[in-house]
Each structure stands twice: as structure tokens, then as C-alpha cells.
Image (cartoon, helix red, strand yellow):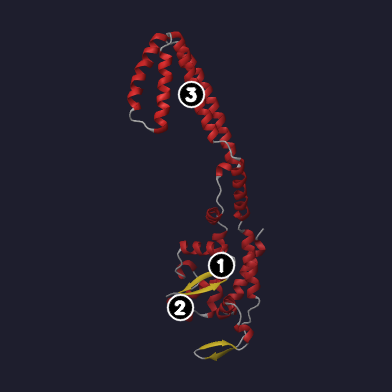
Amino acid sequence: MKSIKQLTLLTLAVSYWLVAARSGDVMTDLSIQTGKLRQDVLLNLKESKWFFFTATASMRQMARRLPESSRGATVKALGKVVRAYVESSTFKQEWLQDVRTYYPYDESYTNEGLAKQQQAQEADKASLKTQMASLDQAFAQMDPGMLQLAVRAQLSQEEQELASLSGNERANKANHIAVLKKMLNLPPAEFKKQYLASLKDQAQANLNQSNASATVDKDQLAQQRKQKAEFDAHADFRPLLKKRLQDFIALTETVDFEARLVPMGYKQEFANPLYQRKPAEWKFLYRLGKEPVTEARLFAQQWLADLP
């Protein structure tokens, strides 16, 4: 089993020196996969206090071999990698995607979504107007008797299709056929007039139905805008980053690297009982050592100062 330590966020940039062999290409030296680093940074930034760091046996072995003189430089090098990623557009996109999973909202209810919906409705109205004009133009050239014959032939086909339908679809089709049969009994000129009117009525009904389905429910609009506001409140990660940096800096300033250890059974414990009751992340920084922790604090202070 891998041992898991609970640490504060910014200790992420500190802890990885444990596997460093040199301070050149820090990602290669530490055998850190880019995907793993991104996952850890995102996870630990959004956690309110803790993150999980897995220390393998090989990492602990390399830590014992690592010269103390290289620890600070390694921490600084990795800190630059972490900062570059957090300041990248890739991280911003991944952050927003993650926030969206916790604070989902329907884009169709945003101002932009509603504007697009309104534009689509206006376009549909214009399209219907064009279709109506085209129908008038086409019907003006049709012979009433020939039109009646063509529709009668179409009716026969629709009656055959009726047998394969069921439920509301069958009922609607049957009603359409009944209306059409009634119109076909009219004189050709009157049939042509009513048939054209029925086509226009159907087109208008289809448009009305489409617009009705797109009508914004006021309660749903209020709910979606509330959810969008919650998303917006968490969209900017910088306030959270500032707090993480401040908390880390404050923690590092409390560590007494001169604290004395005494044997206690098979392990060592702090001679000062107050230190023994310190949280795990405080003890981790103590074990890490003054030089790398100081370097990490300086890096965090500079990063904090550069934030808008």
C-alpha cells in the first residue's frame, strides 16, 4: 500500500523534491507526468484545506540520497512549472470545466442564449413570410381542377399510410384526411382557395408550436440565472489561489526547524509536547528542512505579490 499524507495546497510545489536527482529538466528528473501534475494542481487548488500526496518507496529512497544543497533549487524549479501551468489558458479552461460540473447551468437561459433564441424566432418568422409568398405565387399559376386531382391522388396514399400509425399520430392523420375529403367535395375554385388557406394555417401552427416550446418559463429562468450566478462566483480561481498562498506562507513561518527530537520507542517524537500536537502538514515541513521550505515560501510570496 502507498502511504498517503495530508498536506496543504502549496506543499505540492515543495513535496516533489523528494524524487529529484538533479535540477535540470525538473519534470523529467522527477518522473512527473504532465497529466498527473495537472490533475494534482487542480485537485489541490479547489480543496479547502487538504490534499493527498502519495509517497512511494522509491521516492523515499531517493529522498535519502538527495543532497541537501539541491533541494531548494529543485523546489524553485518545480514551483515555476506549477505557476506556468496555473497561469496558462489550458488551466483556465480546465478550471471552468471542473466548476461547471459542480455548478451546472443551461446556456439557453443566459443573456447570450436568450438573444440567440430571439434571433432564431425572428428568422423563422421571416422564413414563414417568404414561404407564404412563394405559396401564393405557385398557387396563382395552378389550374384548380388539376390541383384537385393531384390532391385526391395524394389522399389515397395518405389513407394507406394511416394503417401503420397509432396513438396521437394516427388520430391527427385521420383528422387531416377527414378535412381533406371534405374540401375535395367543393368546386375546384373553392377547393383551391381553402386548400391554400389550410397549408398556410398548418405552417403558422407549426411555427407557433415551435415558439411555444421555446417560451422561457419564468421560474426556470430564475433558477437557471441563480445557478449561472453560482458558477460565475467560482469561475475566477485567483481569490482561492491567493488564500492558498497566504495560508501556506503563514504555515511555513510557524515551523521551528531547531525543534529537538527524542527517541520514543521505535520512532522519534518532538521533545516539546506542543510540537507533537502540531498538524501533519507542519511536521512534514519540519522534516522537509529549512532550506527547501524557505525557498518555497519565497516563491509563494513572490507569486502572491504578482497576483492582481
* Residue 146 appears left or right of 89: left
* Residue 153 appears left or right of 305: left
Which residue, given by chain and number where applicable, does mark 1 sit on?
79
Q: Are marks 2 and 1 in contact (CB under 8 Å)?
A: no
Q: Residue at x 60, y 58 (%)?
A: 237
In this view, the mark in front (3 or 2): 3
The one nearer the camera, 302 or 179, is 179
Q: Is residue 49 visible?
A: yes
Q: Quadrant of the C terminus?
A: bottom right
Q: Secondary structure at mark 3?
A: helix
Q: Is residue 43 above or below residue 97?
A: below
Q: Residue at x 60, y 54 (%)?
A: 235
Q: Position of residue 16 (x, y in %)?
A: 51, 71
Q: Position of residue 279 (x, y in %)?
A: 59, 77
Alpha-carbon span between mark 3 and mark 1: 66 Å
Alpha-carbon span between mark 2 and mark 1: 20 Å
Q: Amino acid at mark 3?
A: Gln
Q: Quadrant of the N terminus?
A: bottom left
Q: Which mark is residue 202?
A: 3
Q: Are marks 3 and 2 in contact (CB under 8 Å)?
A: no
Q: Is residue 183 above or below residue 247?
A: above
Q: Is residue 143 visible?
A: no
Which residue, given by chain and number where applicable, does mark 2 sit on?
62
Sort mark 1 into few (<14), some (14-19) or many (20+) by Cα contacts within 10 Å. many
Q: Position of residue 298 (x, y in %)?
A: 63, 71
Alpha-carbon span between mark 3 and mark 2: 78 Å
